[in-house]
Amino acid sequence: MRIFTISDIHGSYLALTQVLSMVNFNIDIDKLIINGDIADGWPETNKCIDSLMKIKNLIHILGNHDLWALQWMNG
């Protein structure tokens, strides 16, 4: 198992997929630690979340933009 970390995706699905592709990330074996801010910025946050949820070994730390998005969604 290899361990990777990433942060500040900000809804950029293209950048996320490019980075994971560049390192030949294996969603079944490798571990990904996200240091916050999947949401806010580019309009593809939902695609990012759907893609990240497929990773078996995922650790997600909420960032300030993620918290703002959750607060907005909860009204």
Image (cartoon, rainbow, N blue to C red):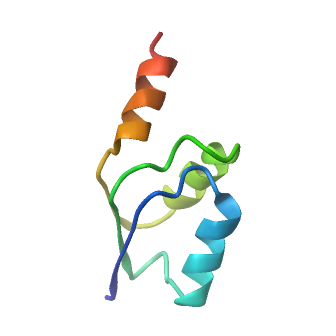
Above or below, 7 against 71 in this view is: below
Residue at 35% from the left image edge and 39% from the top image edge? 64
Above or below, 22 against 61 in this view is: below
Residue toward you, 1 or 61:
61
Location of residue 70 in the rendering, given as x and y in whole percent from the top left corner: 43, 27
Residue at 34% from the left image edge and 45% from the top image edge? 63
Describe residue 28's horizontal placement relative to residue 33 as left or right: right
Location of residue 1 in the rendering, given as x and y in whole percent from the top left corner: 31, 88
Location of residue 42 in the rendering, given as x and y in whole percent from the top left corner: 67, 47
Residue at 59% from the left image edge and 88% from the top image edge? 22
Describe residue 53's horizontal placement relative to residue 63 as left or right: right
Q: Residue furthest top?
A: 75
Residue 45 found in image quarter: top right
Above or below, 38 against 5 in this view is: above
Describe residue 27's horizontal placement relative to residue 1 as left or right: right
Location of residue 37 in the rendering, given as x and y in whole percent from the top left corner: 43, 49
Residue at 60% from the left image edge and 50% from the top image edge? 11
Number of disc labels: 0
Above or below, 43 against 57 in this view is: above
